[in-house]
Image: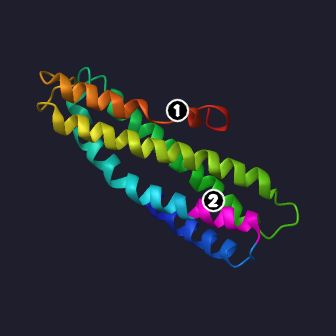
Amino acid sequence: RTMTQSLVTLAEDNMAFFSGQGPGETARRLSGVFAGIREQALGLEPALGRLLSVAHLFDLDAETPANGYRSLVHTARCCLAHLLHKSRYVASNRRSIFFRTSHNLAELEAYLAALTQLRALAYYAQRLLAINRPGKLFFEGDEGITADFLREYVTLHKGCFYGRCL
């Protein structure tokens, strides 16, 4: 939660800074990417908390606290941590003549795309938990739900997890 609050604060600061930099395309995109980071981070944090609160139910055993829900939470937190680091860097260096605007913008856009898809994955994970019987990892019964779920899942953009984010 502290990481998300710090990220939101930095995103708002950077968004305000770049909004005041005139009508240029790069400033508009930077302001927009920070607005997106803020929105996705705020939307993702509660979902991660809910997933982590039930993740222990799906661990292999008490000595092996690992499963897909934990992996999703960990991956999302790594993405948030990278965005926090990059947002701090931008806030500290945005006025420097050596600030590489296009490089930083590309990095932020790539990680925002990954964060957006991680938020969607967290949504699907929560749906999976709500649809399944308590403590059950897989669908049992209604084939229509399985088909609908897979049809929606296929629409997720997976390319954002490669390249810069890999």
Residue for badge 2: 87
> Residue at point 52% right, 32% down?
158
Q: Is residue 85 part of the magenta span, yes or no?
A: no
Report the front residue among 29 and 53: 29
Three-letter amino acid code at the position of disc 2: Ser
In terms of image quadrants, where is residue 89?
bottom right
Dot 1 lies on which element?
Answer: loop
In terms of image quadrants, where is residue 92?
bottom right
With 105 as the anchor, is 32 left or right in this view? Answer: left
Q: Residue 85, how many percent across, how many down? A: 62, 53
Three-letter amino acid code at the position of disc 1: Lys
**106 shown above or below 1:** above
The stretch of residues the image draws in magenta is 24-34
Task: Please tell me the numbered disc located at residue 158.
Answer: 1
**116 shown above or below 33:** above
> Residue at point 50% right, 62% down?
38
Task: Please tell me the numbered disc located at residue 56.
Answer: none
From mark 2 to mark 1, how far is it between C-alphas?
24 Å
Q: Residue 112, how many percent across, how many down? A: 56, 50
> Residue at point 87% right, 60% down?
98
Nearest-to-viewer mark from 2 and 1: 1
